[in-house]
Image: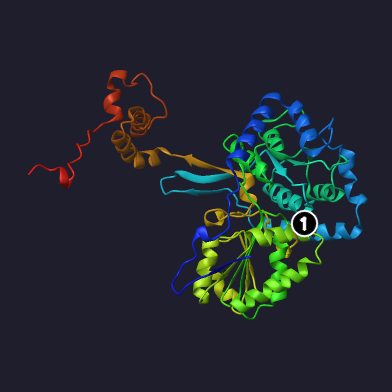
Amino acid sequence: MKYVELEEGERLREEQLTRQGILPTKVMTSAAEIVARVREEGDAVLRELSAKFDGVEVECFRVPQEELDTALDRVDARFVTAIEQAAAQIRDFHEREVQQSWFTTRSDGTLLGVKVTPMESAGIYVPGGRAQYPSTVLMNVIPAKVAGVERVVMVTPPQKEGGLSPYTLAAAKLGGVDEVYTVGGAQAIAALAYGTESIPKVSVVTGPGNAYVAAAKRLVSGDVAIDMVAGPSEVCVLADATADPMIVAADLMAQAEHDPLATSYLVTCDAAFAREVERFADELMAQSPREEITRASFDNLGVIVVARDMAQAVDAVNVIAPEHLELHCKDAMGLLGGIKNAGAIFVGAWSSEPLGDYVAGPNHTLPTGGTAVYSSPLSVDAFVKKSSVVSYTPQGLLHDADAAQTMAQAEGLWAHALSVGLRRQLAERGADVFGEDRPAAAAAGGIAWPITLDAPKPAPGDQEA
């Protein structure tokens, strides 16, 4: 792992991290070609790319309903119990996120508010490359269903022998997925966004994936809603001398084992503690069935930051803005207020990040690559849309008309002012519609702009001496 030792008063700089960006030009170009072809040629391209990238000849993309319905019967009952517990806790958490439509009435009778409406359909992408992720199924479908989405579609790459992981299908059945399609990669995102002969388009696309999936999501954004453009997984552990170095090592490895491009950060004020963590990580990796992936992540992208004091360490964490943050410190809860940038914060030594991956309840689809500076975890909000509601009374219109017409005149938007001005005349007459006394078109100018604004005065520097 790379060491960064901060001097007194020094701030960690982004260039000292090992981030490489998630969307190289080559990936974006390739994804753009795939998206364009799927949009133009549909299922034929999906079949071609499934054979090319997954090594599978797919005739029918949709998983038969019977296979989905019996999925829970084909896996160990202990696994079913585990995902039932996870689903219940994920659902309970996300139900607390639900926002209701609301309305308020002004004293003049004008009604204002927000109408919250579920998306009609959602597509969730579930990775299926280096590992299977039934947890990702639950983390995406449950908030969609809690939001009220009627049609939730899942896409995931087929396995080499064809078909899908029984664990993934079991989670899909339990979570309430309505349709499952065996297609992955950038082509799956394009199919969800634009539709094909077999896969009807959706309103919103969520879920993590590789760089090509992320690139495709960026490309289709604007034609369809997306949750975020996510990169490889990452964790940052802020640890003081009270932390157990073996546990910290295991927590860092828990993200590194996802992907050689995953990143693990350790921030501490104790260089000796950092060396102990490295020693335990080396010993534990030798026992891991995913040693090669984990070691590549540690060696190429891992970073240890040694700060002079806890304030400097917390500042370094905020610069990293990690996807997952663990606070392995004596006063972990006391540090929480100082954390400004993190996707999910695990407070205290008992709060293992993998608990959040699976069963705690908050969503594990999180902003990566420093985007926690401005992004949030996946939530129910991703699956709803909000409409402003405005309902004026004649009294309300008379109250606001002058201000609206004056602003429209300042912006030079004549018809804006006319639209208000005509209603203003009706309200002043106590009428709902014009009768024979309808104003002549020639009088519209005076109705739109009943006064003329004075020209702006010159700025102080522009005044003549």
- Residue at 52%, 64% (x, y): give it: 318
Q: Quadrant of residue 348?
A: bottom right
Q: Nearer the viewer, residue 431 or 21?
A: 21
| Residue at (32% x, 28% y) in the render | 414
**Residue 115, percent across and down?**
57, 44
Taking the image as drawn, is residue 257 in sight? Answer: no
Q: Quadrant of the N terminus?
A: bottom right
Q: Is residue 126 left or right of residue 338?
A: right
Front-lying residue, 461 or 298: 298
Residue 331 against residue 325 in the figure, above or below: below
Q: Which residue is mark 1?
A: 87
Residue 123 in the image: state x and y as whole percent: 70, 41
Q: Is residue 447 left or right of residue 112?
A: left
Q: Which image quadrant is residue 410 in? A: top left
Q: Quick check: 9 left or right of 70?
A: left
In the depicted structure, whether residue 8 falls above or below residue 356? below
